[in-house]
Amino acid sequence: MSLERRLSELAARYGLRPPESPRVRRALERALAARGGLEDCLPLVTNHHTWFLRDRAQLEGLVSRARPGARVWSAGCATGEEPYSIAMLAALAGARLEVHATDVVPQVVERARAGRYAELALRAVEPALRARFFVPDGDAHAVAPGLRARVSFGVHNLCEPPPNPGGWDAIVCRNVLIHFEPEAARSVVARLCSALAPGGRLVLGAADALLAPPPSRAPRPRPAPRPSSSPPPRPTTRPRRTSRPPVASGLAHLNEGNDRARARDHDGALTAYANAWEDRDPRLAAEARLLAGVALRRRGDLDVALRALREATFLDPSLWQAWWTLGAVAEALGASERAAAALEAARNALSGPRPRRLVSDVVGLAGLDLAPERARVLLARRAFPDPGGASWTPTTPT
């Protein structure tokens, strides 16, 4: 059976988008050649990279609003860091929650249930919490028995009916749906909402803004002019202004995201960029996708970063920073032809007399704060800074 046929089956049964990476596709071909079933392909097409206390403020807000004994479902829990984090924060707050966690890959659920983690997964856990909730286990850290007892695990496909329908006070499904086909993701959201108890909360991740439908280049129809035989009468008095609440600018959200990116808070940056995703100014909407793509790349979500960057170039073909970053991501995924085409588009966008400058404050974010003449040199050499990291070249006026 062909790879494309199997990928179609994966999308139909599990809602997962086909991977863009040639490396992953080759691994899938090898798995299928070894007579592997669809379930054997799941570890190759699902992303299980996460860590403890990821986007901590969001989880603390969930715990602070939960009633005593609330039932919380961590849907798409990967290797278990998220549900254990919820239970940890609940213990710190003196709250008792029932936390149930599920993932679609049985092997991953077993790892979560075992509760043994490398140092990297605990990078956001301060020493006092490590001492309270973990015990040394060779070169790793094991979840303490008291914390492990607060979380139960199971295997579940989000494209199937939920466990305990209508009985969840909160469902946490963060940065999972971005790996789904858009229509499947919307169906999952509807299914999760139906599984909530009255007054329950659905908690999604910042990158789930990428579930928005792709932008359209079709021009908006202009309203037909009103037929009139004479000009309208001039008002004799000035119209009375009505007070409206101030609307937060998309530019303010982008600058907030850039501040967080400088602090390497990529989840917080994505949350801020998502708030500018639907800005009416196409420059800001394109820039939000570019900056989100950079944050996703630095977080390791290359497939999703590629999608955001492609949308940025669709909205604003003159955005050479998006073409340049798209080329770097495509190259990292092993798509050399796509990378070469993107870099050529970046050169073309830089060849004009006034190359596009970013609207938001990207000073200090390497690759984004480059002066166009410096970018031309780097493109010719194929020597690029790490996008979004500390600036390594001064910004010069053009």
Image: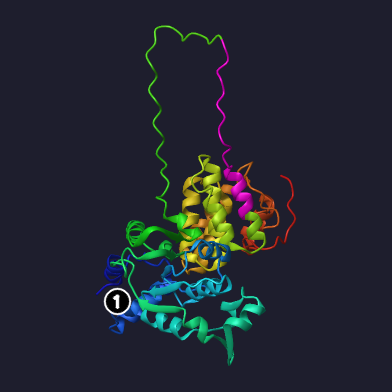
Name, please, the residue furthest toward the bottom: 138
**Which stretch appears magenta?**
237-257
Q: Nearer the viewer, residue 311 or 163?
A: 163
Q: Nearer the viewer, residue 167 or 68?
A: 68
In x, y percent, where is residue 196? 36, 61
**For mark 1, what is the residue?**
38
Name, please, the residue furthest toward the front: 68
Q: Residue at x 27, y 83 (%)?
A: 35
* Lateral position of residue 83 relative to residue 392, left or right: left
* Lateral position of residue 375 relative to residue 221, left or right: right
* Lateral position of residue 87 relative to residue 397, left or right: left
Q: Residue at x 37, y 22 (%)?
A: 224
In x, y percent, where is residue 254? 60, 50
In x, y percent, where is residue 193? 36, 58
Residue 27 shows in this picture:
no
Residue 98 lies within the magenta run: no
Residue 239 lies within the magenta run: yes
* Badge 1 element: helix
